[in-house]
Amino acid sequence: MSLVRLRTFIEVYRQRSISAAARMLNLTQPAVSQHIAGLEVAVGRPLFERQVNGVSPTSAADELAADIGDKLDAVEAALASARARSRDVSGALQLIGHTDFMAENLAPELAPLLEAGIRVRMHTGDGPMVTQMLLEGHCDLGISAHPVTDSRLKSEILLTDKVIAVASPAVVERIEQAAEFNKALLNEPLLAYNLELSLVDAWLNANRIDAPNLIPAMVGQDLRAHRNLLVQGIGWSVLPHFLCEKQLNSGELKFIPPPRTNTEIIYYLIWLPSALRQPRVAHARTVLLGSLQGDGEVCS
């Protein structure tokens, strides 16, 4: 069986569509159909049932995909990395992720890519936007704090960090000196990532603080804006430790001791397997995983 036919099969299996697979592979629909037909002859069993809105895999296809899917991705990534080491990897690399992570953690690690001649284009967006841009082929690599749920995408943990409650020293002192910690905390203005309080709720729940009607004073998806307001003595928030480490060390911000525990945030590097056929994408994935994995800070 040829590697090309196997890749075509995996793409059709993941996309559940001949036409969608053809677009992803830059092939014609007849070529994709021929690859599948040839593979079915080699396997000796039908792999897909044609339907109105695409194709449905047979049990034989499920078995074959389970056997070769991840292995094929690994082989193609290895081949692309080898090509990247032996030839020019120049070209534009499209990256998308959370704006504060991109600025604070990702940007300092881009020097090796730029030195290799790769032109980097950075875009910002939340988890759903990252998924959409990768699936539509508009971006090559994504970074998100949302776990991957779409089977067409692959991911690897890039960084794990503590999420801590912080405020200015004056605000923390006010909270700590109050007779009731929970009441004093909730009386201060809250700065939140979104109205769903995705970061805040997890911290409150972990510390058994009941706040069903909590409304943030300010909402924004660039957490650096929260940090700047906190330094000015405005309210409190929960932030990944990497975003406030310098301010904690300088005394501009102070850690709010949790009644029970802190929470964690996990950032994932995400890609479409077919994107790794581009040497610059495979090279960038390897570089970013190597430089960022394990760099999370733990705050005691």
Image (cartoon, grey):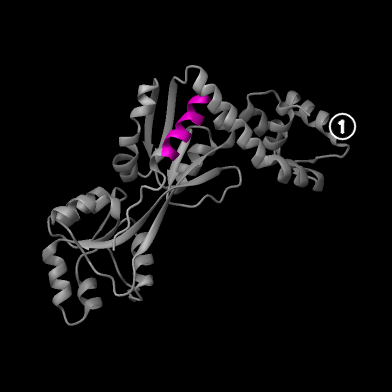
Q: Is residue 16 magenta?
A: no
Quarter of the image holding residue 17? top right
Residue range corresponding to the magenta coloring: 278-290
Q: Nearer the viewer, residue 255 or 58?
A: 255
Which residue in the protein does label 1 denote? 41
Q: Is residue 79 left or right of residue 173?
A: right
Residue 256 appears at what percent x and percent y? 23, 67
Q: Residue at x 81, y 32 (%)?
A: 39
Quick one: quadrant of the N terminus? top right
Q: Nearer the viewer, residue 274 or 19?
A: 274
Q: Residue at x 79, y 26 (%)?
A: 34
Quarter of the image holding residue 299? bottom left
Quick one: quadrant of the C terminus? bottom left
Disc 1 residue crowd, few under 14, some 14–19, many 20+, Cα 10 Å? few
Q: Is residue 156 above or below residue 116?
A: below
- Which amino acid does the dot numbered 1 rest on? Val
Q: Is residue 166 above or below residue 106?
A: below
Q: Nearer the viewer, residue 77 or 199?
A: 77
Q: Is residue 8 above or below residue 160?
A: above
Q: Is residue 181 above or below residue 88?
A: below
Residue 56 appears at what percent x and percent y? 76, 44
Residue 178 appears at what percent x and percent y? 15, 78
Q: Is residue 199 left or right of residue 135?
A: left
Q: Residue at x 29, y 66 (%)?
A: 215
SS at badge 1:
helix
